[in-house]
Image (spheres, grey):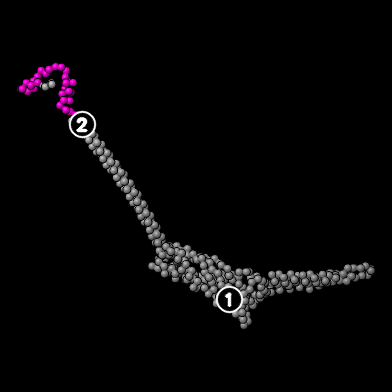
Amino acid sequence: MISFLIFLASVLFAAGMLLATRDKMYSPETTDARGRTEDGDFQPSWLIIPIAVAVLGLLVSIFQPFVLTRIDAGHVGIKVNLTGGERGVSNYEYKTGWLTYDTWTEMIYEFPTFQQHIEYDTIKVISKGGFMADIRPSFNYSMIPDAVGDMFQNLRKPVDQIEQGWLKNAIYSSVNDVANKWAIDSIFNSREAFESAIIVECNKRVSKWFVVSQLRSNIIPPPALQASIIAKTKAIQEVQVAENNKKVAVAVALTNVATAEGKAKAAIASARGDSASAVIIASGEAQAIKVKQMTLTPLYIDYIKAANWDGKLPTTSLGSSGALINLK
């Protein structure tokens, strides 16, 4: 921006010079021997100074060291002195907005103070018990604004190099140290607690300058553990199937028992009913016989005989006595 303004100013100044001295573009008019007026000749020297001004402005705009930059809101700008007795950031101040600096003797570093998301490459970690697993950490981080100057004094690098250097080593070492304390099955059974432990360990190491959050381990189990998990899942499913079959069998057996008990009770009830019915019938018959016995007097019997006699005497005798039936 500053280079363009310098070049533009030099061009405008050269153009102004040309306009101001345009009467010197030609030499004065002359009169020949015949008395005729002749125009003056074009004077190249008239262009020398304006062209020199424009060229000088171009060279100055190319090689001048000043830069106009803007530090956006949500960032911290650090001005670093490259020469003299105040090299470094011993006397720095945080600024936002437009800023002019000399690129030959100064440098500006811009650091974001809002949350950034980053993902690192996969690393291999060894869990408690010797199982190896792959972890590809991803997380959010933010810089502590008041600690940016101190961070730069110690690290002397821009933010992208810090991300791939110091911060990366801190995250990797935290992941390794926490994974060494956790059994592999505990990691997968309690992944949220495992990742929370990594966040706590990371913040212990970087809390001077950074705040780490929203970490995801994206852990991939080793092949042997994958096979074990699949076998365990299959065994659990088989146990559940067997348990369900057992419940079905118990339900069927209970149904059969209930059906049998119902049939038995029905048979008992039927038998009791038949028995009671027979008793009632026998009792009635006995009562009828008893009534008949009470009504069968000798006189009534003789009456029945007489009523049924056809008037003929018997032609046979009863035994050797030769007695006849008494018809009186």
Residue at (62, 76) in percent of width and height? 93
Q: Which mark is residue 291?
A: 2
Vertical comparison of 313 with 67: above or below:
above
Residue at (18, 31) in percent of width and height? 294
Label 1 Cα neighbours within 10 Å, binned few <14 / some 14-19 / many ≥20: many
Vertical comparison of 206 with 282: above or below:
below
Tell me the magenta residue range: 295-324
Magenta includes 311?
yes
User: Residue 280, image x and y in percent?
Assistant: 24, 36
Q: Amino acid at mark 1?
A: Gly
Please name whichever residue, 85 or 45, is drawn nearer the observer in this view of the structure: 85
Residue ID for mark 1: 149
Residue at the extreme bottom of the image, as rendered? 85
User: Residue 59, image x and y in percent?
Assistant: 71, 73
Q: Principal SS element in the magenta part?
A: loop
Q: In the figure, residue 322 lies in which quadrant?
A: top left
Label 2 Cα neighbours within 10 Å, binned few <14 / some 14-19 / many ≥20: few
Please name whichever residue, 243 or 172, is drawn nearer the observer in this view of the structure: 243
Residue 13 seen by the camera: yes
User: Residue 279, image x and y in percent?
Assistant: 23, 37
Residue at (36, 56) in percent of width and height? 235
Whether tag 1 and tag 2 are in contact, CB under 8 A, the answer is no
Q: Amino acid at mark 2?
A: Val
Please name whichever residue, 78 or 95, is drawn nearer the observer in this view of the structure: 95
Q: In the figure, residue 6 lies in which quadrant?
A: bottom right
Magenta includes 306?
yes
Position of the C terminus, as image quadrant, is top left
In the structure shown, which secondary structural element does the residue marked by tag 2 occupy? helix
Residue 267 seen by the camera: no
